[in-house]
Amino acid sequence: MNGIVGAVGDAGRRDLFYLDEDFHLKQRTWNGQEWVIQWIDHGGIFTSVPAVVSRVDTHRPIVVGDLGDLEDLTVDESAGPAPGHGPGHVPPTHLPTTPLTPAGGLAPLEPALPTPAPVEPVPGGGPGVEPWVGHGPFGPEVTEQRIDVFGLGLDYAMYTKTLWGGAGRPSGPWRRLEGVFTSAPAAIWLGDELHVLGLGVDLGMYWRTRTRSGWTPGWQRVGGYFSSPPVVVSWGPGRFDVFARGADFSLRRRRFESGAWDPEWQNLGGNLASAPAVASWGPDRLDVVAVGHRDGATPDGGLVHRWWDGDIWNDWEQIAGRTTGDDVAFTSAPAIATRGPGRLDVCAIDTAGTLRHIAFGDGAWSDPTPVSPVQQMRSTPMLLATGPDEVEVITPGVDRNLWRKTLTAGTWEPLNFWQLGDHVRLPSQYRFSIDLVRVDTARSFNNDTVTGQCTLAVGSWPTRTGRDDWPLRTRTQRLGKMGGTSPDEGQTNLLSLDPVTIELHESAAFGYTFVNSDEPEDVVSAALQGQAEKLAEWSGRAFVKAAAGGVGLTKVEVGDLSAPITGPLLGLLGGGSVRSCARSSRTRATGRSPPRTSSAGATSCTG
């Protein structure tokens, strides 16, 4: 997931946007010579990383008056429900869903998202003109920097705000664009039209446009069934291309040109373990990179690349990973930027938390070199080409601080990183753990060795069941002797998965099993692994069944699976006691999940 987003503006200006610890939108600006010290708080309460687009534009000047006369749309959650008042909505109990077909088809529901109420006219302008802030007449048009920001509120609707001129100028309230979304938005300017896209609750792609006369009347479904947010890029006037990972983990693409969409989504193949990243260095050129799978199942963790050269889509190639001989695997989606024709820069986080950089130039890819040998990073970096021979990367660290580094003329500066300060909230990252095991009722006078295991499978609603679709993460710990004739409890420290990225459109199945047995550790571990795979498969089947019936998957209880599974497990272990549990849930948008408990132990999931 992307923790921060940025935009390059006029005269060297750069603007960063991210969510702070309270899920408010923050901004910081490089004015062309230095970073403006003040962080700007744009308020709101958001459930996704924002999308931003920037350009120089012409508008009527905003005359700033008494902002207290305006209705405040950035509502404090503590104030209770605030219908129609922007990103401070109290979240619904579940995301409304539309029926899905497990085979990956699309339910015939058009449109699935609500149509907003008409935009009220604004004094001095027509319908859809940006809200007038303050008092006084509109003056003649002026030309200055414009930034449009988009994000999802607590009601999962899309919200937007337009920022004009220098950093810190009052910008007025957030505008609600309606809809219900399960992915971060993507946006792009095409001439005088601003296009915005996102995934709906049916995991299809939805699209809306703003022209000089205002927003189109509703969200239009442009099809597909996806397992990653959209990425949008343009290589020339009058056209842009949208990319996303399909439900079958292949790369999908659709073109918008001359005011119309291609008839169908194009399948570009591949087996992607991450969302794609896309760049264009000029007309008739598109480059896509992603983390790939190997053999369709086992995560390889290397980087793969495919490109359009003006005539054909060239086949996928491996540019980093075990098969290229560098033995590097990545845990974040990549970021890509171009400094000009024939040049590409790619950055991603490896399994050790190190930021690595791969460059393309003179027709060849470099090795994945470490950029952060000391500082550990936490999520997908933001990469901007800021000049013909300069790239800037900004990444949230494991401490959630923002860290910055620049590549100029082939040299990274500084030696480690500059710290930009403040702390980033990564709304799609969670911690899953078993914190405490308590034996309330002993079945034997003997206190045998307890071994615990927790597992996590994360993915979109699968189009077929099985662990091939849901790569399984496992943690195992032997807790020593427990049980006997009295209650007993023990703390755990290894049964933890952190950080775990779960996007809004994805589902997660968290399972845990505890075994009382003095069998050798390798025998117990092998039996537990088989148990974990069965738990994941049961969870996947539960999701498919519920999705096919159009059920809102806020939570699906798979329940105690001891009857069908523990018989063979007990046979392997030669006796003892086993307790199993699997829980599945649709990701909550706030990034904070409540504690969960069961008779098998105590679990927690926190953002």
Image: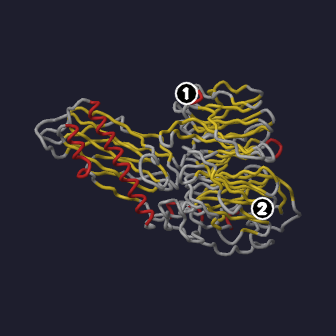
Specify whether residue 246 is in view.
yes
Left or right: where 456 falls relative to 183 = left
**Image location of residue 245, percent across then percent down:** 59, 51
Specify whether residue 50 is in view.
no
Question: Above or below — where is 282 with respect to 412?
Answer: below
Amino acid at the residue labelled 1: Asp
Identify the element where label 1 is drawn. loop
Q: Residue at x 63, y 56 (%)?
A: 185
Dividing the picture into quarters, in which one does residue 487 lie?
A: top left
Decide which of 122, 215 is in the foreground and name it: 215
Left or right: where 510 falls relative to 249 = left
Decide which of 72, 330 is in the foreground and name it: 330
**Image location of residue 319, percent across then percent down:** 64, 33
Q: Residues within 10 Å of mark 2 (few under 14, many from 20)?
A: some
Residue ID for mark 1: 327
Decide which of 164, 509 is in the foreground and name it: 509
Left or right: where 384 falls relative to 47 = right
Amino acid at the residue labelled 2: Glu
**Image location of residue 463, percent across then percent down:** 48, 56
Label 2, label 1: how far apart the Cα atoms are: 45 Å
Residue ID for mark 2: 193
Q: Residue at x 76, y 43 (%)?
A: 309
Q: Residue at x 33, y 41 (%)?
A: 435
Dividing the picture into quarters, in which one does residue 545 lie?
A: bottom left
